[in-house]
């Protein structure tokens, strides 16, 4: 456990000792702000029964941020260490492969969550100026944060996997970007298709990420979605662990 | 503490795709020894060290450190070694003390022990002045010492240093060598180098590697003796060439000789001894007896290449 915490702390600190962390947060905040402006303009045009939290996820801004931020957050995790050689010093200390993968994932994931904190400020603005007491309603907040954390877990796990595959940060980022956007296009298709009884259709229906996220933001926590995101995240973490272990078979 | 040797390598082979990096090597290192792995780039030094540190798996054969198998009991092995890889990779964005603390915690030291040990190794490696500086901004000599401090911080039984003095200036090299020497007795040290005098100065034993094989393994003194046996002697003597020629051919200890004119009355004689004796006292006595003038008398210094030639020769004969 000591090793895990030490590693996680260092991994998380690397985002903040260099400029990368701040640039990612600034970029995400900028896009969240744009999203906020769009929402407010639409609200001015016509009223909607949706809660504000859900409105944030009704546009595509959220997914654009996720797909763009995930590669940048995760590309360095393994690739940079392999490139600079510190991977060798790390792997020759008494740490297990599992600890390394878990720590790197946790640090990336925590950073992802920190990145979203400014969004809560936007919600607060709505509550304060529009006298919308429901904007920061605990149920919806929990749903939104949980949903966001699950989406983040999936994308950070995916990014860690890509980073473990290579020693070039650029390649890692590209792989994550391609996988991420493929997941998005799959989600588009899934949203369009009406779910029938065949298993193919059922399976595809699970990839309707947009409506799943909207459910979370409405405060509806669907076990199927939780299982879906968690299992996909674990799948990619498992693959990452295998890649890290593969050093021993070569 | 158990009685097993610190390092025990048996029939170790490592093949990369299409290339054999280590060809069936075996060796032992006893506790407390300082052993130098000597060889040029690509001789298999780094590969040996990477396998011993558990970073790379071997293709076949076994390697044990303090009685633990480096592959099957990797964590036990890693607990007992301090490894500084080639080019000494460090986390450049961290501060010196912060980095050493991080490494100590990673190696499982308790909070209090981390503080004590980090202070100790920083003093040992003269890093106290730069404890708050950022690693990436330090000079190469300091970086190297940070790497050494990292290798020492958990008081490992075995310290593996891959080319610890490469790229340093002479002062820094001297400081690093002093430091390595000071480790003798407390730790077992395996260092790799391609500089012969370095190994001579710091090691109890040298192992010479070439193309993935260990060609010779002995104390620096013995290896030098081996070399001296082939040592040619150079003498510059003021005497007529025909007298010199006649004189050398009479001496039984001289196997081969070559006399060439130098400036003035001097002649340059290159003499190869038979069966490894030292010709110098003999020449001196002769010069005295004949009343010649001697202005230079040296035995060739041997470079690493000469040792290679020397130690590779029997194998070539075997193969031929």
Image (cartoon, coloured by chain):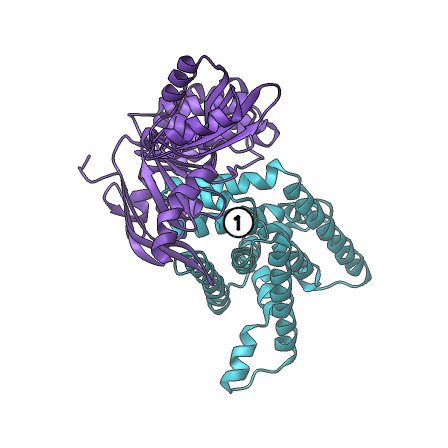
Chain colours: A cyan, B purple
From the viewer's side, name the closer residue of B283 and B38: B283
- Residue B282 position, x and y percent, is 36, 21
Residue nearest the viewer, comparing B110 with A136 = B110
Q: Where does the image place residue B248, in percent across and percent down from the top left?
A: 42, 28
- The quarter of the picture where the N terminus of chain B appears is top left
| Residue B225 visible in the picture | yes
Q: Nearer the viewer, residue B187 or A67?
A: B187
Percent x, y for residue B167?
56, 32
The residue positioned 57% from the left and 67% from the top of the image is A212
Extreme residue in the left direction: B3
Which image quarter holds the C terminus of chain B? bottom left
Check disc 1: other Cα within 10 Å, few if <14, some if 14-19, many if 20+.
some
- Confirm whether residue B152 shows in the render: no
Based on the displayed image, in which of its 4 quarters is residue B193 positioned?
Answer: top left
Q: Which residue is mark 1?
A: A82
Q: Work out whether residue B190 or residue B305 is closer to the camera in this orientation and state it.
A: B305
Residue A48's place in the image compared with B145, above or below, is below
Q: Give the left or right position of residue B193, taking residue B29 as reference.
A: right
Above or below: residue B77 compared with residue B264? below
SS class, disc 1: helix
Q: Chain of mark 1?
A: A
Identify the residue at horizontal 56%, vertical 77% (top origin): A205
Asked whether, in this view, residue B67 is left or right of residue B140, the answer is: left
Task: Residue B192: name its quadrant.
Answer: top left
Number of callouts in the render?
Answer: 1
Horizontally, residue B198 falls left or right of residue B79, namely: right
């Amino acid at each position: 456990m000591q090793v895990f915490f030490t590693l996680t702390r260092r991994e998380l600190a690397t985002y903040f000792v260099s400029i990368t962390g701040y640039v990612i947060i600034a970029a995400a905040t900028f896009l969240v702000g744009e999203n906020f402006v769009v929402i407010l303009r639409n609200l001015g045009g016509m009223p909607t029964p949706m809660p504000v939290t859900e409105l944030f996820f009704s546009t595509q801004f959220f997914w654009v941020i996720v797909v763009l931020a995930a590669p940048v957050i995760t590309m360095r995790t393994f690739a940079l260490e392999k490139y600079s050689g510190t991977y060798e010093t790390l792997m020759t200390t008494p740490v297990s492969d599992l600890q390394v993968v878990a720590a790197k994932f946790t640090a990336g994931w925590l950073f992802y969550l920190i990145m979203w904190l400014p969004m809560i400020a936007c919600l607060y603005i709505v509550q304060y100026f529009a006298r919308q007491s429901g904007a920061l309603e605990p149920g919806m907040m929990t749903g939104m944060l949980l949903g966001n954390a699950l989406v983040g877990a999936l994308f950070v796990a995916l990014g860690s996997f890509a980073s473990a595959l290579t020693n070039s940060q650029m390649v890692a980022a590209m792989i994550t970007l391609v996988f991420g956007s493929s997941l998005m296009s799959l989600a588009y298709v899934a949203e369009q298709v009406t779910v029938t009884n065949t298993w193919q259709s059922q399976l595809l229906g699970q990839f309707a990420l947009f409506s799943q996220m909207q459910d979370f933001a409405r405060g509806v926590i669907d076990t199927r979605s939780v299982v879906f995101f968690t299992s996909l995240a674990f799948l990619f973490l498992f693959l990452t662990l295998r890649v890290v272990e593969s050093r021993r078979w070569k | 503490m158990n009685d097993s040797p610190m390092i025990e390598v048996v029939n170790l082979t490592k093949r990369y795709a299409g290339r054999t990096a280590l060809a069936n090597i075996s060796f032992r290192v006893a506790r407390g020894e300082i052993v130098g792995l000597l060889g040029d780039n690509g001789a298999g030094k780094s590969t040996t060290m990477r396998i011993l540190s558990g970073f790379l798996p071997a293709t076949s054969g076994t390697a044990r450190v303090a009685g633990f198998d480096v592959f099957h009991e990797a964590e036990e092995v890693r607990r007992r070694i301090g490894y500084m890889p080639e080019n000494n990779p460090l986390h450049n964005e961290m501060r010196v003390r912060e980095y050493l603390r991080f490494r100590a915690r990673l190696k499982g030291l308790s909070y209090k022990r981390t503080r004590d040990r980090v202070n100790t190794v920083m003093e040992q490696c003269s890093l106290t002045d730069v404890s708050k500086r950022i690693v990436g901004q330090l000079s190469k000599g300091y970086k190297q010492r940070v790497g050494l401090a990292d290798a020492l911080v958990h008081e490992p039984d075995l310290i593996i240093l891959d080319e610890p003095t490469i790229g340093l200036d002479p002062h820094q090299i001297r400081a690093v060598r002093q430091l390595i020497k000071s480790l003798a007795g407390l730790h077992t040290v395996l260092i790799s180098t391609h500089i012969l005098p370095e190994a001579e100065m710091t090691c109890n034993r040298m192992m010479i590697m070439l193309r993935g094989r260990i060609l010779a393994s002995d104390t620096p003194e013995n290896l030098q003796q081996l070399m001296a046996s082939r040592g040619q002697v150079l003498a510059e003597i003021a005497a007529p060439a025909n007298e010199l020629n006649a004189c050398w051919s009479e001496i039984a200890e001289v196997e081969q000789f070559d006399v060439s004119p130098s400036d003035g009355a001097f002649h340059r004689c290159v003499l190869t001894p038979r069966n490894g004796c030292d010709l110098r006292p003999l020449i001196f006595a002769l010069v005295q007896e004949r009343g010649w003038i001697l202005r230079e008398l040296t035995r060739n210094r041997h470079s690493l290449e000469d040792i290679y030639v020397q130690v590779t020769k029997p194998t070539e004969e075997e193969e031929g």
